[in-house]
Image: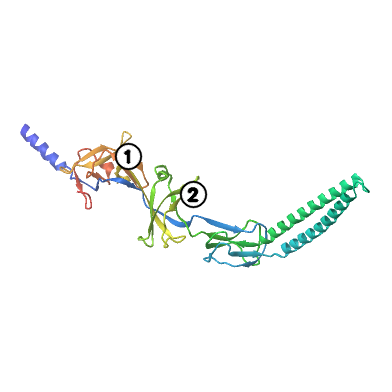
Amino acid sequence: MSAFLLSSCQRDDEATERPPRPVKTVAVSFNPEDTFGSLVGEIRPRVETNFSFRQGGEIRERDVEVGDQVVVGAVLARLDAEDAQDALRKAEANLFSAQAQQQNANTERDRQQQLYPRTSTRQAFDAAIAQASMAQAGVDAAQAGIRIAQTNLDNRVLKANAAGVVTAIGGEVGQVVGGGQMVVRVAQLGTRDAVFQVPEATIQTTGGDARVDVQLLSNPNAKATGTVREISPTADPVTRNFTVRIGLDSAPDDFRFGSAVRGTIRLSGEPAARLPMTALFSKDNQNAVWVVDAANKTTKLVPVEVHRFDTEDFLVTKGVATGDNVVVAGVQQLRPGMTVRLLEGSAE
């Protein structure tokens, strides 16, 4: 009777034994260089100048359009200069009058000097000297007025102080603009930056001397390298990303302003394995992953040390070895020692 009951129990266990659970795995691979996810940005000029008039007025002439290349000293635009010309003529007349008064005052001073002390008093001589000094001050003031009027007239002409290309126009002929209002924007052609919107986690783990590989999206063969030149002190209020400008060492001509580029940051450091976030398992507040034994296809929970969490994956530095098969789907249904079956596309 005992043998019969034991035989019946064994048949029941075999009947209730579950088939191997299907899982998908990836093979662990450690790389000496950690590559952040590709970031897409654009090419911008390193130096871009907004040209504006110091004083307001009506635009009478604009000599450039968007896309025009300009040289140093090229005229960009002109304001109505009639008032400034009248002011200059008035200043010239004031100078002429001041010079005439100075000449008379100097003549009177010289005459009083010859008469003193024979027929002239000391008081008259001192008054002549003072009058000559006042006349000289009047000439100096008139000359300063001419310089101011000439400067105001010159400021009615807007000139480029560096060679570049016109990227924007802020004023049309006949439009009245205020002092300091952008009329023409010129980008210098000598140097270029690659500008990216970078997550905070990437900035915190990237040194300022990190090398960045940049390539055109439209032409991957057009490449350049550079270093981080500027990081914005504040994050974008919507995306919470930071604007990072990469100073390119020698950008090819294909790197035109506004071109879309892909940037890659490489860091030389401790080898790390990148695993998808679906492989992460937590037990007792300890990060772990499920590893499938290659010989008997059973699972084992292995604690790991996570170096960094990214958006869709994470980096592991310790706990697994190169070639280990890590489960990346259905980890919440696994138990230690469970027999599994690898799905198509899994690492063997």
Q: Quadrant of the N terminus?
A: top left
Distance in Å between CA atoms under marks 2 and 1: 29 Å
Q: What's the image's color scheme?
A: rainbow
Q: Is residue 268 left or right of residue 299?
A: right
Residue 14 spot, x, y in % from top left = 13, 41
Residue 261 found in image quarter: bottom left
The disc, 2 or 1, on the residue closer to the chain's N-terminal end is 2
Which three-letter amino acid code belongs to the residue tagged 2?
Answer: Val
Q: Is residue 239 above or below residue 219?
A: above
Which residue carries the number 1 mark?
306
- Which residue reaches farthest top? 2
The foreground one among 44 and 95 is: 95
Lateral position of residue 320 relative to residue 61, left or right: left
Instruction: Identify the residue at image location x=90%, y=50%.
Output: 115
Do the numbered discs 2 and 1 sit on residues whose CB atoms are within 8 Å?
Answer: no
Image location (x, y in percent) of residue 104: 85, 56
The amino acid sitting under disc 1 is: Val
Q: Residue at x 39, y 56 (%)?
A: 224
Indicate which disc residue 238 carries.
Answer: 2
Per the image, label 1 sits on a secondary structure element best described as strand
Asked if residue 85 can be seen in this view, the reply is yes
Label number found at residue 234: none
Number of numbered discs: 2
- Give neighbour class at mark 2: few <14, some 14-19, many 20+ (Cα, 10 Å): few
Q: Is residue 1 visible?
A: no
Would residue 214 be found to the left or right of residue 151 on screen? left
Q: Residue at x 9, y 34 (%)?
A: 6
Q: Position of residue 37 (x, y in %)?
A: 36, 50
Q: Secondary structure at mark 2?
A: loop
